[in-house]
Amino acid sequence: MTPRERVLTVLNRKKADQVPWFGDLDYWATSLITRGEKPEDFKRSDAYLQWHRDLRCGFYLQGYFPFKEIIENCDVRTWNEGRKRYREITTPEGTLRECWRYLDISYSEGHEEYLLKSEEDLPAYNFMIENTRYEPDYDFALLRRKQVGEMGVVLVYTPRSPFMHLLALDAGIMTIAYISSSAPEAFAETIGLMRKKFTEAAAIAAASPSEIVMTPENLSAEMVGPKYFDRYMKDCQTEWSDMIQAAGKFSCIHMDGTLKGLLREECGIGLSFIEACTPAPVGDLAVGDWASYMKGSETILWGGIPGIYFTEKVTDGEFDRFVREILSVMRGEPRYVLGVADQVPPDGLAGRVRRVADLVDEYGNY
């Protein structure tokens, strides 16, 4: 079977010839482009899919939102100062500003200043949300459909759910904790406004020329927990998953942190699968214990190999032992996809990525 045939067979809850192996190589590719080892257009090119073929690694993830976000009736200004990237949004209710700093050592950027800083910013933030609209932007999905072939599937993103959007992008967990405690009604109103608008974008994603629609939550149980999940996330995720599956597509979320505190809850949503599941010793739950947290659920779990295992910080022998141990669990029943948890890092080794397919051939047959 091809990588595409394997993963579609398992996602349809049937048994393939062996455990599907699919890796997120996007972050690694970004670092190679930055270092001049790959061309600027590498990730959009046919060569990117050939790279996956050469590495014998199934393709699925490209960090792509199939819609344009258009903020109206506001003055939106962006600029750079050295390694810092700013965005300022002026509304009739006040001005919002954020700052991201690029870190050379990690080939990524992080917040120095969040857009939403306190309860006082909610009127301006609400105005911005209410005056945002979305338009379909399917060109990249159509390109990927031509490129992917036997190596995988086409995946697109919805927005994050409103709570996770605030946590990961616009406010941070401390501001969320303060506002939801000190002004719960105002916070709930903002979440409601966001859900209404974000659902418009999610519907565009569900209608896109793709096979999988992911809500890229970047979820970790120690940051959210059952209380926040039940109050602010469960209904939204359920609505979107139902909508995606009604459109004939597979639904999933990205959960790349600790699992114990939320895996049961997420397995109860009705998602097709949960992606980037990170096991112990990097996460908090061994692969062999995953099944006990999803009893009664048909949700498939996708992940298993922490990113650091693809670097020289882990020996070849330990890498082989760890992957064999994972496969001894995953080959028992077709409810897993072997993947990276959550990305091959910038110091990843090509030989390690290639080695996974060899191990699956030897130890991954059902």
Image (cartoon, helix red, strand yellow):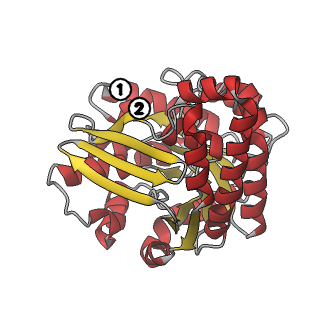
Local SS, label 2: helix
Q: Measured from the top left, where is residue 331 in percent x and y?
A: 63, 42
Question: Viewed as shown, does residue 190 lie left or right of 110?
Answer: right
> In which quadrant of the rendered image does the N terminus lie?
bottom right
In this view of the protein, can residue 212 be seen by the observer? yes
Q: Which residue position holds label 2?
A: 320
Q: Which of these two is toward me, 161 or 247?
A: 161
Give the quarter of the image for residue 147: bottom left
Give the quarter of the image for residue 210: bottom right
Residue at x 49%, y 59% (from the top left corner): 60
Q: Which of these two is toward me, 152 or 91?
A: 91
Crowd band around label 1 with a 10 angstrom C-alpha radius: few (<14), some (14–19), many (20+): few
Crowd band around label 2 with a 10 angstrom C-alpha radius: few (<14), some (14–19), many (20+): some
Residue at x 66%, y 67% (from the top left corner): 206
Residue at x 69%, y 44% (from the top left corner): 191
97 up-or-down from 307: above or below:
below
Q: CA distance from mark 1 to mark 2?
A: 5 Å
In this view of the protein, can residue 348 be seen by the observer? no
Q: Measured from the top left, where is residue 67 in percent x and y?
A: 53, 68
Q: Measured from the top left, where is residue 294 in percent x and y?
A: 77, 34
Q: Amino acid at mark 2?
A: Asp
Which residue, as the protein is rendered here, is positioned at the far front? 92
Residue at x 16%, y 49% (from the top left corner): 35
Local SS, label 1: helix
Question: Viewed as shown, does residue 277 lie left or right of 349?
Answer: right
Q: Measured from the top left, where is residue 41 in percent x and y?
A: 26, 67
- Image marks 1 and 2: residues in contact by CB distance under 8 Å: yes
Q: Amino acid at mark 1?
A: Gly
Q: Which residue position holds label 1?
A: 317
Q: Which of these two is toward me, 260 or 118?
A: 118
Which residue, as the protein is rendered here, is positioned at the far right? 296
288 up-or-down from 139: above or below:
above
